[in-house]
């Protein structure tokens, strides 16, 4: 061992081996249920309440949650933790959207399907660019976080740890599709919740909450400030970032399509309830660094560092497992949902409308591997703080919030307004990111976006026919080829 | 500077921990319920 890690490299590799093998085995096992394209891509559209809740929650508990919540706590105190928790509101508000999605687009595959049918091809192209940029940014930050945490906890080289995590996730997603993703998500959810609870419980047993409070109030009182301006601004920023991420991303749309119509809205609401306390429970660990006098040299790794300092090897093992689960549960979902976006929206809708089942399955495998390789290549040079990479994509997705909401619930929402909202919101939001800071970028982007959609739709209202959304496979579809075409 | 009251701080941390632990139990209960009724997948 060297540096601050409390696990040996050997233990780290053993844990990686055990859990990596388990996920691959389970992925292949559940993947056998996928008999056709709907099975592989959407788990047969028949996922129940328990698996639905767990997969929505686990996907949203990213490695960023485990790594950044402590960073938020140590930089912005109590409001920082609460700000991170507001990301759960996206899950709450997606619940009625999931209900509507299942009703209006019963045969949909992706969020891109909705944008294309609702706003046309220009909006669709812009939306796909935003969605793909964000998904890759998310994938890269998680792969980077994986490498960082393995190095912090066990001294496994950043490049090796990051590579193994990606390899495991690519392998089981490749074999099992969404069945594998959702099945493993359930086990990962239970492990994440139990692990965070156990680490937190150990911490409060060892260091009294009063002791933490007194120490923070004495050493860094700003962290307990009721009116910390940056933290309060970050709260609203995070709220809109969360809305943007969830409302637009195919990761959640694919789950809405995969769940039974009667449980989708309930599952999303419950997943939000289960998610809400996690950033607080994971974040407060970082505040223990102050009474313990731990010197924070690497802000990205503050959570695992403090947990292993407080709890020793057992705590380090627990944090290691929790982070590995949170990484896997999000990376697999992103691989599955983003590859589906490529296959359905780019390949099938733009290039090969009459592609057959086998061709789409083969292509799905290629895209999953390609996404893994791209993420690996971008993650190899470890750059910047994790939150900078993540929040740079915030204003882009925030610009899509209101085009999506208005498109689903307001028939007067205008397609040109949606296009302008995404373009202007993104440009202004990214500008705000550099001129003001990450804590304001998503908020400003969302405000510009809603103003654009609302104004244009009120001035030039569209009278959208909702039945248009139920494409019902009347357009070129899998297995229904015109004579003379090739599968 | 107005600080968070200590009791509110304690409530936040303890509440979050208990809530997190209960979340795990809720998931296990739900999967058992779905398993019994044949509604897992």
Image: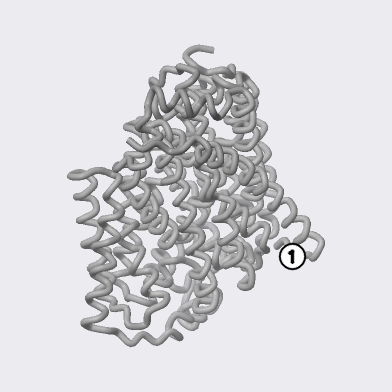
Q: How far from the left and from the top, in percent, is residue A215? A: 46, 23
- Residue visible at 31% across and 47% down in the picture: A233
Quarter of the view holding residue A246: bottom left
- Residue visible at 53% across and 46% down in the picture: A61
Quarter of the view holding residue A420: bottom left
Q: Residues within 10 Å of mark 1 (few under 14, many from 20)?
A: some
Residue occupied by mark 1: B39
The residue at the far top in this view is A2
Q: How far from the left and from the top, in percent, is residue A74? A: 41, 31
Where A267 falls versus A192 (above or below)? Answer: below
From where the camera sits, is residue A117 visible?
A: yes
- Judged left or right of residue A252, residue A316 is right
- Judged left or right of residue A320, residue A374 is left
Q: How far from the left and from the top, in percent, is residue A383? A: 33, 31
A201 and A13: which is toward the camera: A201
* SS at badge 1: loop
How many numbered marks appear? Answer: 1
Q: How far from the left and from the top, in percent, is residue A72? A: 40, 37
- Judged left or right of residue A143, residue A195 is right
- Residue visible at 78% across and 65% down in the picture: B38
From where the camera sits, is residue A342 visible?
A: no
Looking at the rendered image, the quarter that the N terminus of chain A falls into is top right
B13 and A43: which is toward the camera: B13
User: Numbered disc 1: what chain?
Assistant: B
């Amino acid at each position: 061992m060297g540096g601050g890690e409390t696990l040996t490299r050997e233990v780290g590799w053993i844990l990686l081996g055990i859990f990596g093998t388990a996920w691959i085995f389970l992925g292949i096992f559940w993947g056998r249920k996928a008999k056709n394209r709907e099975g592989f891509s959407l788990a047969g559209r028949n996922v129940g309440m328990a698996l639905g809740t767990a997969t929505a929650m686990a996907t949203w508990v990213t490695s960023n949650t485990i790594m950044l919540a402590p960073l938020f706590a140590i930089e912005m105190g109590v409001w920082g933790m609460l700000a991170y928790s507001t990301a759960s509101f996206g899950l709450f508000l997606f619940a009625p959207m999931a209900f509507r999605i299942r009703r209006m687009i019963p045969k949909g595959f992706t969020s891109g399907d909705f944008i294309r049918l609702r706003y046309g091809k220009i909006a669709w192209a812009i939306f796909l660019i935003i969605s793909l940029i964000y998904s890759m940014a998310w994938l890269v930050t998680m792969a980077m976080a994986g490498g960082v945490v393995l190095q912090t906890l066990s001294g496994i080289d950043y490049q090796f740890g990051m590579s193994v995590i990606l390899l495991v996730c690519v392998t089981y997603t490749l074999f099992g599709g969404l069945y594998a993703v959702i099945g493993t998500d359930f086990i990962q959810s239970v492990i994440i919740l139990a692990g965070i609870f156990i680490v937190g419980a150990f911490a409060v047993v060892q260091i009294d909450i009063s002791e933490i409070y007194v120490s923070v109030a004495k050493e860094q009182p700003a962290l307990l400030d009721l009116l910390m301006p940056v933290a309060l601004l970050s709260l609203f920023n995070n709220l809109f970032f969360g809305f943007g991420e969830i409302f637009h991303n195919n990761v959640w749309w694919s789950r809405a399509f995969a769940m039974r119509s009667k449980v989708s809205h309930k599952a999303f609401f419950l997943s939000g309830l289960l998610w809400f306390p996690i950033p607080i429970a994971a974040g407060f660990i970082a505040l223990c660094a102050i009474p313990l006098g731990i010197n924070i040299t690497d802000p990205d790794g503050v959570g695992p560092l403090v947990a292993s300092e407080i709890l020793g090897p057992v705590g380090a093992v627990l944090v290691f497992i929790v982070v590995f689960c949170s990484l896997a549960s999000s990376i697999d979902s992103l691989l599955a949902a983003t590859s589906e976006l490529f296959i359905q929206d780019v390949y099938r809708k733009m290039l090969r409308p009459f592609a057959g089942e086998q061709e789409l399955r083969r292509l799905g495998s290629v895209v999953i591997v390609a996404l893994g390789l791209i993420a690996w290549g971008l993650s190899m040079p470890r750059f910047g703080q994790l939150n900078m990479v993540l929040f740079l994509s915030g204003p882009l997705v925030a610009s899509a919030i209101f085009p999506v909401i208005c498109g689903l619930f307001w028939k007067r929402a205008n397609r040109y307004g949606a296009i302008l909202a995404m373009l202007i919101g993104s440009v202004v939001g990214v500008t705000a990111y550099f001129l003001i800071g990450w804590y304001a970028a998503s908020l400003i982007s969302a405000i510009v976006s809603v103003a654009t959609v609302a104004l244009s739709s009120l001035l030039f209202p569209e009278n959208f026919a909702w039945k248009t959304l139920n494409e019902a496979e009347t357009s070129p579809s899998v297995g229904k080829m015109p004579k003379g075409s090739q599968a | 500077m107005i600080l968070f009251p200590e009791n509110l701080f304690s409530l936040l941390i303890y509440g979050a921990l208990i809530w997190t632990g209960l979340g795990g139990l809720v998931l296990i209960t739900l999967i058992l319920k779905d398993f019994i009724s044949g509604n897992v997948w």
